Image (cartoon, grey):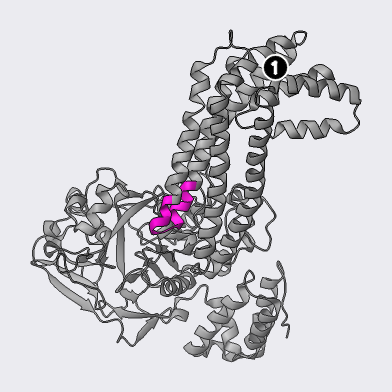
Amino acid sequence: MICAYSPEPFKQLFKLLNIFLFFLDDKSVLTARKSDQRRAVGLYLEIGNTDTASPAIHGDACLRFSNTHSSSLLFALRALADYRAFGIPESNAVVDIKAFNVASFTLNNLTRVFLSPVLPGRESLKLPITAFLVEHKPSKKKFMFDLGMRKDPENLSPAFAQLFSSKAITFEPFKDITELLTDAKIPLESIETVVWSHGHFDHIGDMSKWPKGRNIVVSSQTDLSIFPDNQNSDLQASDLDGHKVVKIDLASSNLTIGGMKAVDKFGDGSFYLLDAPGHLAGHMIALARVTPTTFIILGGDTLHHVGALRPGGAFQITVPCPGELLESAAGKISTDFFWSSGSLPGKFDITTRTQPLLALSDVDGSFFVDPPAGTVSVAKLAAMDADADFLTLVTHDGSISAALPLFPASLSDWKKEGLKEKLAWLFVDPENPAFLFSPVSHGSGAFEVAHVVAVGHYLFETTVIQFSHPEIGLVNVPTSMLVSFFVNGIITCMIEVFFGLRIYRVSNGRYKLVAIVIWVLAVAQLVIPLVPVFTGSSETIPLVAFLTEQTWAVYSAMALSALCDLLIVVGLVYFLWNERDHAHKRTVVIVDKLIAWTVETGLVTGTAATLELILFAVNAFDCEHFSLDAAKYLKASQGDGSLLTVFLLVCTQTHYSQISTLALLYALSAAV
């Protein structure tokens, strides 16, 4: 037989050849034990993980793979197509599923408590809230899996109402699930049971609007304590009053599906509830059989973005990413934050990425009570998600909001309709609202363009239009230069406020004062340039007089800039280093990279800001003459290398002493 660690693209070929040869060698494969099947699934996924495992590990896995009962080899391939490998019993009983988009909300500056990493500009996250109507075909009984949120969040328990009153979570007006069902002409009385995947406010709806006597199905591990007895509870008396709570004891179940404890709700194999810990105690997901051999996974809050589930090596075998998305995503997914074995700087290769792009948040305040357990739940879910017979739908998948068929459309024929292929890769489409894999500028780009235009206008006037009269451009303060002062101040303020926000997020307690000081200094730097803008006159104030009158402003701005840069660098390095010990192991690499970048850029900006201040102090009242003298010296030196020296010295004055720098540029153009 053939068995060796094989790099892409021959790895899959070797796997298939191994299986084919063993199939010829052993005709007993069709009677393989389920334990062999499950073991083969694990080995198949282990060999497929090329991003994190070394060749030695692959070789060991391959050796064990070849020594496993030969029947396991066939099932390693069949695992991607046969639901029985996950321990699901055969059955012809099915359910029908229809989806309702109840609402959507925006988590303002809260992405970090759900996902990792959070790229610059991706601090806020807009998520849909989906609820599912399930009909048990044999009995014709309807029930709900999750209900979405209530319309009046101000009436939630105080711990969660404050998230809305503080604008940490915002939403647009919507119809709740009871209104949507009524509009769909489905009487609430016809729905006897509601299943809560867990007890968070965006899943339990408003049970006070339902007819009394509903069965509320929850995990036995769900905390049903209510406010005010439990000040941190989502639940209130109105959520349970008049209804019957049915607790599902998953822990003692003898049935395991895909490594998760499971309970067969109807006892006929049509609908299973599975234990998926991590997000909240008692969190459950559902496995719905919609045809005898195909399933829909209702994943609840196992994750809040499918980037934490995909791509994965096995998933890409089942559902390859479409070529057009591979091309568009390659240049948009930041290789500063994401990598794969086939990637190049600036060009990300999805096809060789065998791990999900995102991870669950494990920072202080994370919405996952047990991130490690949550990560295991995601891994178990990913194994089924990679199977061609499973469609995974999570409550808050924003990537499919515009593409998921909603009520009255049935989702039961999803495989025949190719729905999995249509939805699976939308999250890496750069045009999709859920795309989170590249940094976003905070609007400074427009101001930078304005700044360049203003400076360009000044240079064009003084070097082209007034080429024969340098005294015009050097003596008076041009309007375009005043504009560039102000725009440059805005850019600086935005950048420093942004970094202050980063420090505020990663710091705790009194250390948040560092961020507040940075914000104050940044705003002060924005206000100071207004003085020369509104007091300068492009027609009457000579350049030297202008600098003399505004020396205090220039000194102040430069000193504040240097101080701000110092605080940002020291603060970021200090807080990132402290957080490093608490980071997820996959996040540590990114934290180290951020620390290195901060030190490198801090040395450059800090040195430049300090040198700028020193040079202006030396030449505060003689910038114009300094520029002209430099031009004469350069002309006399006839290119002996002093040109670069003087040019670099003066160009360090690029923040608020731009006048001297641009005067030098003019003088250089006139001298050449």
The location of residue 134, given as percent across then percent down, is 27, 64
Q: State whether residue 505 appears in this view.
A: yes
Residue placed at 13% from the left, 67% from the top? 240
Q: Quadrant of residue 294?
A: bottom left
The location of residue 321, given as percent across then percent down, is 57, 57
**As drawn, is 67 to the left or to the right of 406?**
right
> Which residues, given as a range, are shown in magenta?
500-513
The answer to if 509 sits in the magenta stretch is yes
Q: Amino acid at mark 1?
A: Phe
From the image, give the main secondary structure of the stretch colored magenta: helix
Badge 1 is on which residue?
460
Q: State whether residue 338 appears in this view.
A: no
Q: Quadrant of residue 416?
A: bottom left
Q: Quadrant of residue 50?
A: bottom right
**Looking at the image, which is closer to me, 425 or 187?**
425
- State the SS at label 1: helix
**Looking at the figure, which quarter contains the N terminus?**
bottom right
**Looking at the figure, which quarter contains the C terminus?**
top right
